[in-house]
């Protein structure tokens, strides 16, 4: 369960990877918005957990540097990336007549601001699909590309008539939980490869442990800024054969 995520359980998991699996680098993804985030309070809790992840990474790396260890914990800002994807998708959702739906004036995200995604309250706009088994409605900005017409649904189970609507699904997140890797996969894998490169592509670079940590942290920031966002890929990052 999400509430089982604590400082102790995170410390135990990372230490397990280091001490028993023998990992030299652990990459931790921040908690992103999914259909399991039911309300703004739970989204705020996810933000606090992401802050805890960043703090723990800094602590592990500082301790490793002081003890002359090569072990590193790196943060992959997946939440930042995916919220930007939801934001961009919301602005392109079409109404049944082809016009913009409800988000044409949604301002671009200020992704450089601390906890900027906590202002993304539009993520909690829900709709009820036709099937009664879905007790927790999907978030419209996460799964829809075009809204359908409203219709009357006779809910025999609850003995009431409901106004519902469907939508045409997008190619980003089909069910509000699982990502379409053909869409988000390239950025995800590029970001992961970049972060691992920060730790391992250092042959011939001689520096103190403290300076090495500083360089790796700067590399981590650059990787997240480039790949865990919707900014265009800087061509200088690409190999000539790519």
Image (cartoon, grey):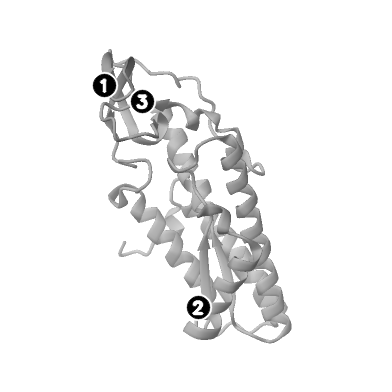
Q: Are marks 3 and 1 in contact (CB under 8 Å)?
A: no
Mark 3 is surrounded, within 10 Å at the Cα level, by few (under 14), some (14 to 19) or many (20 or more) other residues, namely many
Residue 193 appears in the picture as rendered: yes
Asked which secondary structure carries label 3, the reply is: loop
Q: Nearer the viewer, residue 212 or 151?
A: 151
Identify the mark at residue 217; answer none if there is no mark.
Answer: none
* Residue 123 placement (x, y as % from top left): 48, 32
Image height of 26 relative to 33, above or below? below
In depth, the one of 130 and 168 nearer the eye is 130
Q: Are marks 2 and 3 in contact (CB under 8 Å)?
A: no
* Residue 55 found in image quarter: bottom right
Secondary structure type for disc 1:
loop
Nearer to us: label 3 or label 1: 1
Q: Where does the image place residue 210, in percent across and percent down from the top left?
A: 72, 77
Q: Is residue 176 above or below residue 10?
A: above
Badge 1: residue crowd in 10 Å (few <14, some 14–19, many ≥20): few
Measuring 56% from the left and 62% from the top, which residue is drawn there? Answer: 75
CA distance for labels 3 and 1: 31 Å
What residue is at 44 percent from the left and 43 percent from the top? Answer: 34
Which mark is on residue 200?
A: 2
- 175 or 84, nearer to the observer: 175
Question: Which residue does the image show at 52% across and 72% down from the upper left?
Answer: 26
Which residue is tagged 3? 93
The span from disc 1 to disc 2 (Cα, nearest Å) is 60 Å
Q: Which residue is mark 1?
A: 156
Q: Mark 3 vs mark 1: which is more N-terminal?
A: 3
The x, y position of residue 118, in whole percent, is: 60, 37
Asked whether disc 1 touches disc 2, contact meaning CB atoms under 8 Å apart, the reply is no
Mark 2 lies on a secondary structure that is: helix
């Amino acid at each position: 369960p999400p509430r089982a995520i604590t400082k102790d359980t995170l410390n135990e998991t990372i230490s397990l990877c280091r001490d028993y699996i023998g990992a030299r680098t652990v990459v931790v993804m921040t908690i992103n918005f999914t259909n399991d985030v039911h309300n703004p309070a739970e989204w705020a809790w996810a933000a606090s957990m992401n802050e805890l992840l960043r703090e723990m990474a800094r602590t592990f790396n500082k301790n490793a540097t002081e003890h002359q260890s090569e072990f590193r914990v790196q943060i992959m800002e997946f939440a930042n990336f995916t919220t930007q994807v939801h934001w961009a998708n919301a602005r392109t959702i079409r109404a049944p007549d082809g016009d913009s739906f409800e988000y044409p004036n949604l301002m671009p995200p200020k992704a450089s601001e601390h906890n900027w995604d906590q202002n993304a309250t539009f993520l909690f706009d829900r709709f009820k699909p036709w099937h009664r088994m879905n007790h927790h409605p999907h978030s419209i900005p996460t799964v829809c590309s075009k809204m359908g017409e409203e219709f009357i649904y006779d809910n025999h189970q609850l003995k009431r008539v409901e106004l519902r609507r469907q939508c045409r699904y997008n190619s980003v997140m089909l069910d509000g939980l699982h990502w379409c890797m053909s869409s988000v996969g390239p950025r995800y894998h590029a970001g992961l490869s970049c972060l691992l490169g920060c730790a391992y592509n250092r042959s011939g670079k001689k520096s103190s442990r403290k300076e090495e940590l500083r360089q790796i942290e700067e590399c981590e920031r650059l990787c997240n800024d480039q790949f865990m966002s919707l900014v265009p890929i800087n061509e200088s990052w690409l190999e000539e054969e790519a």
